[in-house]
Image (cartoon, rainbow, N blue to C red):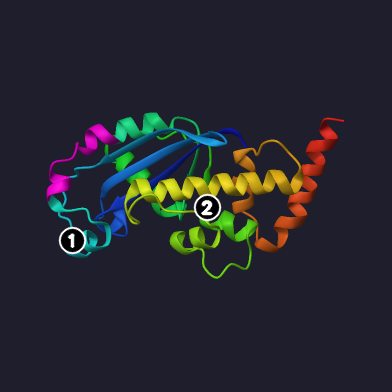
Amino acid sequence: MFAQAIVMIDFETSGMSPLQGGRVTEVAALRIEGGSITDRYVSLINCGVRIPGFITELTGITQRMVDCAPPVTEVMPALVEFIGNASLAAHNASFDEQFLKVESDRLGLRPAHDGLICSVKLARRVYPGLPSYSLGRLAKSLDIRFRGAAHRAEADAEVSAQLMLKIANDLCERHQVEAIDPQLCVRLNQLTAAKVPGFLKQYFEAQRNAYV
């Protein structure tokens, strides 16, 4: 369903912003190729940071789990390599990309992903009018099931990846095409919801005319 690879990423963190001292505590990155998840990189992360009690209550990630995890100096290079030059996607993507950039900068790494897709924004444009676009409620509305605990990186990334696959499948069916270019999703993120139907009509008409 996707013409090129997408990597869906989810970070768990010790705080809401890296600019306020938040550090990454867990990451899951799932590679989507065609119509399925083909590979994944999942790890707890030790940044030498204290885990606040409310974070443990929310995620189940304890201080001991993080203290025993691989160091950030090992995880981040492996993560950046795993992402490569695929398109990067996340639910509330600005949050995850900010942590990716800050942690990479600390180590002199340069992520090379080809564009950023926010599945929150994308769902708002493809499925307007739903009661909520939070991951749990959106998944319930679209009949996508969690396979693990919410607020853990792999479970959240898995549901987000299934959401991306559903969006791609529905766009293919609506517009009678075989595959979706991830860059189309990047472009849809940049449009207001009102402009999306007209844009998609012109986009797919132009694609069909190109092959006539």
Which of the 4 image quarters holds residue 56? Answer: bottom left
Q: Measured from the top left, where is residue 114 in percent x and y? A: 52, 36
Name the residue located 19 percent from the left edge and 36 percent from the top edge.
Answer: 70
In the image, residue 111 lies at what x, y percent?
41, 35
Q: Secondary structure at mark 1?
A: loop
45 or 162: nearer the eye?
162
Q: How many marks?
A: 2
What residue span does the magenta drawing correspond to? 64-75
| Mark linked to residue 119 | 2
Measure how far apart labels 2 and 1 are at the Cα level.
Answer: 28 Å
Residue labelled with disc 1? 52
Q: Where 185 falls versus 75 (above or below)?
A: below
Question: In the image, which disc is placed on residue 63?
Answer: none
- Please state the horizontal and vertical placement of residue 132, each as a whole percent of the image: 52, 68
Residue drawn at point x = 32 percent, y = 30 percent: 78
Q: Is residue 170 left or right of residue 38?
A: right
Tell me what residue is drawn at x 67 percent, y 36 percent: 179
In the image: residue 203, left or right of residue 92: right
Q: Is residue 53 visible?
A: yes
Q: Quadrant of the C terminus?
A: top right
The quarter in which the N terminus is drawn is: top right
Quarter location, residue 107: top left
- Residue nearest the viewer, comparing 112 with 26: 26
Mark 2 or mark 1: name the one nearer the start of the chain: 1
- Say which of 132 and 184 sits in front: 132
Residue neighbourhood size for the residue with mark 2, other residues' Cα within 10 Å, grouped as few (<14), some (14–19), many (≥20): many
Q: Is residue 68 left or right of residue 167?
A: left
Name the residue type under label 1: Pro
Which element is circle 2 on? helix
* Residue 74, above or below 91: above
